[in-house]
Image: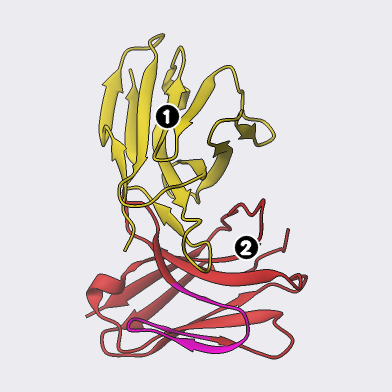
Amino acid sequence: GAVVSQHPSWVICKSGTSVKIECRSLDFQATTMFWYRQFPKQSLMLMATSNEGSKATYEQGVEKDKFLINHASLTLSTLTVTSAHPEDSSFYICSARSTGKGNNEQFFGPGTRLTVL
Amino acid sequence: LAKITQPISMDSYEGQEVNITCSHNNIATNDYITWYQQFPSQGPRFIIQGYKTKVTNEVASLFIPADRKSSTLSLPRVSLSDTAVYYCLVGDHTGGFKTIFGAGTRLFVKA
């Protein structure tokens, strides 16, 4: 099946720094990628929809200037958490939709654990 | 978007069949029903997807009645490794589809 990778798998940073998380579709092209955030014992919360070559669409309540999304190619989307603070500590998960498959199935990455000190 | 209702948690024993029912009363004509499984600190994993009647694959079956207002994920002969959170999602798979996760069902399989 299709594989989505994320890098890094975990990161610890100091408050006020920026962190970039990469999401790659390894064996398929994805015109659309999604970014989610998940806090402990909670469900995934959709943050934004990333479309290749265009601006991301953010969900209500998600600050676009704080969570910068770049979808520069059909296999790569990046999420940059700018000026991170402890409350941004969370599990960030991306997914990619394969437009080449019949049912537009979404494939999820393994997630990135961000801890802000 | 369809409103999703599924049990918060379920317990089972190894070897039993587990059925998790999801309610989606206002499902739209173009909507598909998809189930995902998630283990702690991992991304969700696709289990099964269907539109109507019954779908079966190597890991599960999905039963969808004619009115499509609910669906049931059936896991045959669960094992301890099936302990996870199971999410029922409903969405239009044409352009603009985005996946919104509900609360999910936490399944705990006991020995």
Q: Residue at x 48, y 31 (%)?
A: A71
Q: Is residue B83 magenta?
A: no
Q: Is residue B6 visible?
A: no
Region in magenta: B48-62
Q: Nearer the viewer, residue A37 or A27?
A: A27
Q: CA distance from mark 1 to mark 2?
A: 24 Å
Figure disc tally = 2
Chain of residue at mark 1? A
Q: Nearer the viewer, residue B108 or B88?
A: B88
Where residue A108 sits: x, y (%)? 40, 52
> Does B105 sit above or below residue A72?
below
Chain drawn yellow in the picture = A
Q: Is residue B57 magenta?
A: yes
Q: Dividing the image into 4 quarters, which one contains the N terminus of chain A?
A: bottom left
> Does A108 sit above or below residue A61?
below
Where residue A68 sits: x, y (%)? 52, 22
User: Please, what secondary structure does the residue beneath circle 1 have?
Assistant: strand
Q: Residue at x 40, y 71 (%)?
A: B107
The disc labelled 1 sits on which kind of residue?
A: Thr
Which quadrant would residue B75 be assigned to in this image? bottom left
Q: Dividing the image into 4 quarters, which one contains the C terminus of chain A?
A: top left
Residue position for label 1:
A78
Q: How is the image coloured?
A: by chain
Where residue A33 sits: x, y (%)? 50, 43
Left or right of residue B81, residue B48 in this image: right
Residue position for label 2:
B93
The disc labelled 2 sits on which kind of residue?
A: His
Q: Is residue A27 visible?
A: yes
Q: Nearer the viewer, residue A5 or B10?
A: A5
Q: Which colour represents chain B?
A: red
Chain of residue at mark 2? B
